Amino acid sequence: MDNISKILLRMDAAHRKSRLSKRPPMLVAASKDQAPDKILPLLERGVEAYGENRIQEAAAKWPELRRRYPGVRLHLIGALQSNKAAEAVGLFDVIETVDREKIALALDGEMKRQQRFPKCLIQVNIGKEPQKSGVMPGHLETFLKFCREKTSLPICGLMCVPPAHQPPAPYFALLQTLGKRHGLEELSMGMSGDFETAIALGATEVRIGTALFGQR
Ligand SMILES: *Cc1c(COP(=O)(O)O)cnc(C)c1O
């Protein structure tokens, strides 16, 4: 069986076991560093959501692929700088890494200018790691209030990358709690090594790279 079939089966099994959400979780193929010939088999199999980390790379790779597969939805899952907001708004359908006021304002301005409104997720620094981006859990409420009052960003969920080398379940559970508390439905959590745990704790979207494409 090929990787994609295995992943879809495992996602389905984890979802059925969880009995949590009625809606099955969505697969976002983390296609960073993957050349188009590695992505094509997934497109042919009907995988429609892809996560990219770098704007430049996505802008080089996707316009051509998108002409051939118009159903594709692109998710920005890497850090965003405010001087790249225009490109991000033009290129992506979901921006998962909104994490500070400056970015929120830059995206808001660009969305109004371009009249294009990609869905937004707030990245939470769920393990409070100094080197990682994301809003600190304790600051989420304030940041969300800012976004809701000062921008018209369509904020619909939360995203996190838990600390490496630690059991991820408590971090996924915390993101789930935060989502519920703030009425945010989408939870983007879970990668190759831990997506079943994430689905058990309510992930609506998992971002999988290595288990689909092999080691980068
Ligand atoms: C690369 C990446 C993934 C995929 O990670 P794998 O372990 O390769 O599945 C998911 N999320 C983010 C933010 C990434 O940068």
Image (cartoon, grey):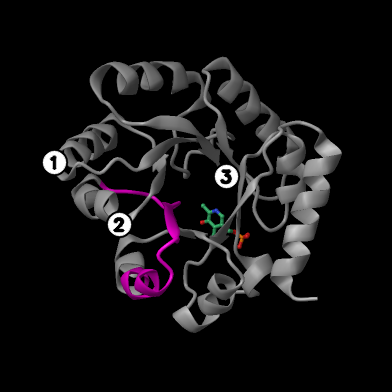
Cβ(mark 1) to ligand 1 < 8 Å? no
Instruction: Say if mark 2 contacts mark 1, CB within 8 Å.
Output: no
Local secondary structure at mark 1: helix
Quadrant in which the N terminus is drawn: bottom right
Q: Which residues are magenta?
A: 62-81
Cβ(mark 3) to ligand 1 < 8 Å? yes
Whichever of callouts 2 and 3 sits on the residue coming sooner in the sequence is: 2
Residue 46 image label? none
Do we see residue 110 in this rendering?
yes
Label 2 amino acid?
A: Leu
Q: Which residue is mark 1?
A: 113
Q: Is residue 78 magenta?
A: yes
Tell me residue 186's x, y (percent).
55, 34
Q: Which residue is mark 2?
A: 91
**Residue shown at 81%/33% (left/top)?**
19
Quadrant in which the C terminus is drawn: bottom right
- Between the C-alphas of marks 1 and 3, the distance is 31 Å
Label 3 amino acid?
A: Val
Q: State which mark lies toward you, 1 or 3.
A: 1
